[in-house]
C-alpha cells in the first residue's frame, strides 16, 4: 500500500521548496545574478536599503515580479482545479469547463482591439499608467461574465445541475471560440494586435509588474477565504448530492459558492498571464496521490503545490533552454498533455459515467 504524507508534512515540504525556488528563480536568466545582489535588489523594492546601481535593480525587479506572478498564477489555477474537481466529483474536470479560460481570453482580445496596435506596449511597459491595466481588467471581467452566463443558463428555477452546467459550459466555450477566431481573423492585417492576441493564448510571464502580482493575489486570497465554507461539504458530495442533502448540506449554495471561488481564482490568473492549461488538472491529482483527498487540507495544499509547480517548471526551462524559453502555456501543455492522456486511460469507467 502506498504511504501518504500527512498534510502538515506535505505543506512544510512545499513551503520549503517554494522558499528555495523563489530566490533561485530570480538568480537565473540571460545573465546570472548572485544571491547577494538579488537580496539587495528585493529589499530595495520593499523600501529597505539602497537600490542596486545601473540596470541591475531593473533586472532584479523584473525577475522578482515574474517569479511572484508565476507562483501566484500557479497557486490560483491549482486551487481552481481542486474546487472544480470537487464540485463535479470528477478528477478530469478543469476550470476551462466553466468558461473561465475562454472568457478571459476573449476579454483580453477585446482589450487589444480597443487600443489597436499599441496594446503590447500598454501591457509590457510599467510606465504606461492606468492603460496598462486594460488587458488584465478586460480579461478578468470577461472570465467572470462567461462563468456567470454558464451558471445562469445551467440553473433554471434556481437549481444548479452539475451535468447541465457541464454541457452548457462546453456550449458557451464553443461560442466563445468562434468569436475569438473571428477576432483573430479580423486582426491578421495588424501585426502588433494579432501578435498580442496570439501571445495571450500561449500564456505569458514576461514583463510582469506589481499590479499583475497584486491582481492574482487578490483573487487567490478571496478564493482561499471560501475554503472553510465548502471543504466539508465537498467531502460529503463524493457520496452523491442526495446523501449530502440528507445530511443537511445546502447543495445549491455550496455549488454556487464553490463555482464563484473557482471562477474568481482562475479568472484572475488567466487575466494576468493568459491561457496556461493543465496546472488545475495535474496538481490536485498529485496532492491526492501524495497526501489527502479531504478538501479542507487538499485545497490549500493545491495552492502551495501549484505555486511550486509552475514556478519550478519555469525555472527549469529557463535554466535548460536559456534564451530559447517556451511560453508557459506551451510548456504546461507539453507536460500536462501526456499526463491527461494517462489519466484518461486509467479512468475509463469514470469517463463512461460522467
Image (tube, grey):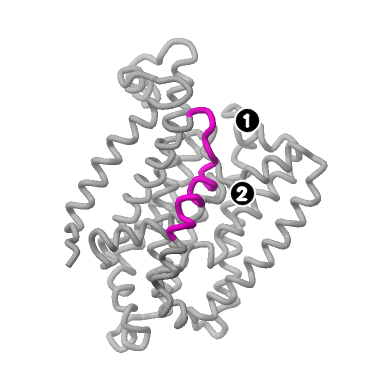
Q: Residue at x 75, y 53 (%)?
A: 183
Quarter of the image for residue 319 reads top left
Element class at badge 1: helix
For the residues marked 2 and 1, what is the alpha-carbon distance in whole angstroms? 22 Å
37 magenta-colored: no
Quarter of the image for residue 298 reads bottom left
Q: Sequence order check: which comes first, mark 2 or mark 1?
A: 1
Q: Position of residue 308 (x, y in %)?
A: 34, 45
Q: Residue at x 17, y 58 (%)?
A: 6
Q: Is residue 123 above or below residue 83?
A: above
Q: Residue at x 70, y 44 (%)?
A: 112
The span shown in magenta is 322-339
- The nearer-to-camera label among 2 and 1 is 2
Q: Which residue is mark 2?
A: 201
Given residues 324 and 197, the one toward you in this image is 324
Residues packed near mark 2 inside 10 Å, few (<14), some (14 to 19) or many (20 plus) = many
Quarter of the image for residue 24 reads top left
Q: Position of residue 115 (x, y in %)?
A: 73, 40
Q: Is residue 172 above or below residue 322?
A: below
Q: Is residue 229 above or below residue 332?
A: below
Q: Which residue is mark 1?
A: 128
338 magenta-colored: yes
282 on left or right of 118? left
Q: Position of residue 228 (x, y in %)?
A: 29, 64
Amino acid at each position: 500500500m502506498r504511504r501518504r504524507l500527512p498534510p502538515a508534512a506535505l505543506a512544510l515540504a512545499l513551503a520549503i521548496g517554494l522558499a528555495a525556488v523563489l530566490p533561485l528563480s530570480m538568480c537565473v536568466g540571460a545573465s546570472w545574478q548572485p544571491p547577494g545582489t538579488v537580496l539587495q535588489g528585493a529589499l530595495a523594492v520593499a523600501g529597505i536599503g539602497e537600490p542596486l546601481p545601473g540596470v541591475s535593480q531593473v533586472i532584479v525587479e523584473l525577475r522578482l515580479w515574474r517569479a511572484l506572478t508565476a507562483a501566484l498564477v500557479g497557486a490560483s489555477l491549482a486551487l481552481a482545479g481542486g474546487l472544480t474537481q470537487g464540485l463535479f466529483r470528477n478528477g478530469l474536470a478543469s476550470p476551462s469547463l466553466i468558461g473561465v479560460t475562454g472568457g478571459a481570453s476573449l476579454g483580453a482580445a477585446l482589450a487589444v482591439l480597443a487600443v489597436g496596435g499599441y496594446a503590447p506596449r500598454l501591457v509590457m511597459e510599467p510606465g504606461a499608467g492606468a492603460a496598462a491595466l486594460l488587458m488584465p481588467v478586460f480579461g478578468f471581467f470577461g472570465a467572470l461574465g462567461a462563468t456567470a452566463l454558464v451558471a445562469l443558463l445551467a440553473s433554471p428555477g434556481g437549481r444548479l445541475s452539475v451535468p447541465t452546467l457541464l454541457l452548457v459550459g462546453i456550449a458557451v466555450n464553443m461560442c466563445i471560440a468562434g468569436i475569438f477566431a473571428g477576432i483573430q481573423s479580423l486582426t491578421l492585417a495588424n501585426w502588433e494586435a494579432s501578435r498580442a492576441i496570439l501571445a495571450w493564448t500561449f500564456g505569458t510571464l514576461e514583463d510582469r509588474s506589481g499590479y499583475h502580482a497584486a491582481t492574482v493575489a487578490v483573487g487567490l486570497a478571496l478564493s482561499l477565504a471560501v475554503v472553510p465554507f465548502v471543504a466539508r461539504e465537498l467531502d460529503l458530495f463524493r457520496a452523491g448530492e442526495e446523501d449530502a442533502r440528507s445530511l443537511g448540506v445546502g447543495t445549491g449554495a455550496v455549488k454556487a459558492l464553490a463555482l464563484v471561488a473557482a471562477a474568481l481564482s482562475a479568472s484572475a490568473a488567466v487575466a494576468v498571464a493568459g491561457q496556461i492549461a493543465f496546472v488545475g488538472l495535474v496538481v490536485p491529482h498529485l496532492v491526492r496521490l501524495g497526501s489527502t483527498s479531504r478538501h479542507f487540507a487538499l485545497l490549500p495544499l493545491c495552492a502551495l503545490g501549484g505555486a511550486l509547480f509552475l514556478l519550478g517548471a519555469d525555472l527549469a526551462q529557463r535554466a535548460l533552454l536559456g534564451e530559447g524559453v517556451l511560453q508557459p502555456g506551451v510548456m504546461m501543455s507539453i507536460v500536462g498533455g501526456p499526463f491527461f492522456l494517462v489519466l484518461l486511460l486509467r479512468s475509463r469507467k469514470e469517463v463512461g459515467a460522467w
